[in-house]
Image (cartoon, grey):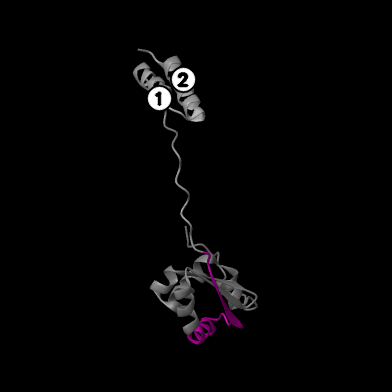
Amino acid sequence: MTDSTFRPAKHFVHSISATQSLKTDENEANVWQRAVGENLARHTSAQIKNNELLVLADSPVFAHAVRSKTVSILEYFGRTGLPMKRLRIRTRPPRVPPPPTTRHRRLSPLTSTVGNLLQKSAASLRDDGLRAALLRLARHAQSKSTD
């Protein structure tokens, strides 16, 4: 069997613009990494829309680093066949870690000994509200007790 004669249309149709042939996520990422360097590319992402390069930076520090390289970035994209009219830089909102998951612990029931101590403590209190709360708790402890 011979080699396939299939060839992507971009190899023989000259009317396809360079922008269209390079507009894949992988190619954009590679061009972006070569334009700004590996370190800066790890903290930024670029997207091409209407001959405009939109850059999202992880923090204001990286946005400033991109801003300082604007001219060289636009020149690089022009040399690769992707002439850009302008470069817009946005800073991503800070990444907020997800809230910690709350685990519902199964509480062990109060023993009858603890219930008796609560009743004795309640008897010596002057505050009616606190006394009532301790007695309710003591009743709960006694009803849950398995001693």
Residue corresponding to mark 1: 124
Give the residue drawn at x 46%, y 71%: 30
Q: Earlier in the sequence, mark 1 or mark 2?
A: 1
Q: Nearer the viewer, residue 114 or 123?
A: 123
Magenta region:
69-93
Residue occupied by mark 2: 140
| Mark 1 touches mark 2? (CB < 8 Å) | no
What residue sits 40% from the left and 15% below the top? 145
Q: Label 1 is placed on what type of residue?
A: Ser
Amino acid type shown at disc 2: His
The stretch drawn in magenta includes residue 110:
no
**Residue 101 higher or lower than 26, as above or below:** above
Between 81 and 16, the residue placed more toward the observer is: 81
> x, y (%) of residue 134?
45, 25
Q: Determine if the magenta segment contains residue 74.
A: yes
Residue 78 on image: x %, y %: 54, 84
Question: Quick one: SS at disc 2?
Answer: helix
